[in-house]
């Protein structure tokens, strides 16, 4: 049942986000749109309450509980960026805003971008592991929480694999076809 709640929360995240952006831009209801966008984190709160209630109700922690902790960690760390990404596109499409920013493709700008994204993944891992440890402490029974311990290793493995992108971009920065580390327009663009 918890896997269904996780799926519903993911769908709910995108539904609330889309409703907020539609209200904000095409319908020109700024306050309603802002209120809906402020409701996006409440979807995560629903998942957190459902997970804690399930464990407090005597459930043995399983795959779904670990997945909920991982989902919450990544949602907190990357959620704001996803909202900003969608907002830039809606503003451009429906309100005449500037074209959405794209991730840098070359040189040190791309390397910085990859390290920032890795930093977010590290925050997500830390949050996920903290939630896992809190669930283990909440239940207080090693037999009922054995599955959660394995999730800390999974999250660590994901972070280790993620580190390959910034490391490779640091060691071998992307270059344009003419061999420059970054095109002139990208070098001149302020951050």
Image (cartoon, helix red, strand yellow):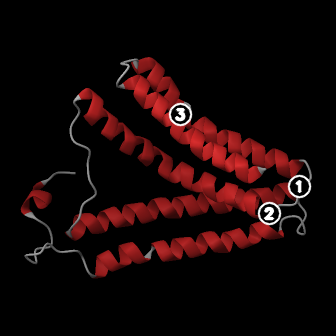
- Whole-percent x, y for residue 30 in the image: 40, 20
Res 138 → quadrant: bottom right
How far apart are the two marked residues, 1 and 3, measured between alpha carbons?
30 Å
Whichever of callouts 3 and 2 sits on the residue coming sooner in the sequence is 3
The residue under label 3 is 16
- Whole-percent x, y for residue 10 in the image: 59, 46
30 relative to 154 in the view: left or right: left
Residue at x 69%, y 39% (from the top left corner): 46
The residue under label 2 is 62
Q: Residues within 10 Å of mark 2 (few under 14, many from 20)?
A: some
Dots 1 and 2: beta carbons under 8 Å? Answer: yes
Residue at x 28%, y 57% (from the top left corner): 103
Res 185 → quadrant: bottom left
- Whole-percent x, y for residue 43 in the image: 62, 39
151 relative to 107 in the view: left or right: right
Local secondary structure at mark 2: loop
Q: Nearer the viewer, mark 1 or mark 3?
A: 3
Res 108 → quadrant: bottom left
How far apart are the two marked residues, 3 and 2, measured between alpha carbons?
28 Å
**Numbered tag placed on residue 59 in the rendering:** 1
Foreground residue, 100 or 41?
100
Q: Residues within 10 Å of mark 1 (few under 14, many from 20)?
A: some
- Whole-percent x, y for residue 132 in the image: 72, 60
**Numbered tag placed on residue 158 in the rendering:** none
Residue at x 39%, y 24% (from the top left corner): 24
Residue at the extreme bottom: 171
On screen, residue 86 above or below 115: above
Local secondary structure at mark 1: loop
């Amino acid at each position: 049942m918890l896997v269904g709640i996780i799926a519903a929360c993911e769908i709910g995240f995108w539904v609330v986000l889309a409703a907020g952006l539609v209200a904000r831009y095409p319908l020109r209801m700024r306050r309603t749109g802002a209120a809906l966008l402020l409701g996006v984190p409440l979807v995560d709160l629903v998942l957190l309450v459902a997970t804690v209630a399930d464990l407090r109700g005597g459930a043995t922690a399983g795959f779904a509980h670990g997945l909920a902790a991982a989902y919450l960690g990544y949602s907190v760390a990357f959620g704001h960026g996803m909202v900003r990404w969608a907002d830039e596109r809606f503003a451009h499409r429906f309100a005449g805003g500037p074209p959405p920013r794209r991730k840098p493709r070359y040189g040190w700008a791309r390397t910085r971008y990859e390290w920032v994204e890795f930093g977010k993944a590290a925050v997500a891992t830390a949050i996920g592991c903290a939630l896992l440890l809190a669930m283990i402490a909440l239940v207080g029974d090693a037999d009922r929480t054995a599955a959660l311990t394995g999730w800390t290793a999974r999250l660590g493995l994901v972070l280790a694999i993620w580190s390959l992108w910034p490391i490779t971009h640091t060691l071998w920065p992307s270059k344009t076809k003419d061999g420059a580390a970054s095109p002139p327009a990208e070098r001149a663009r302020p951050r």
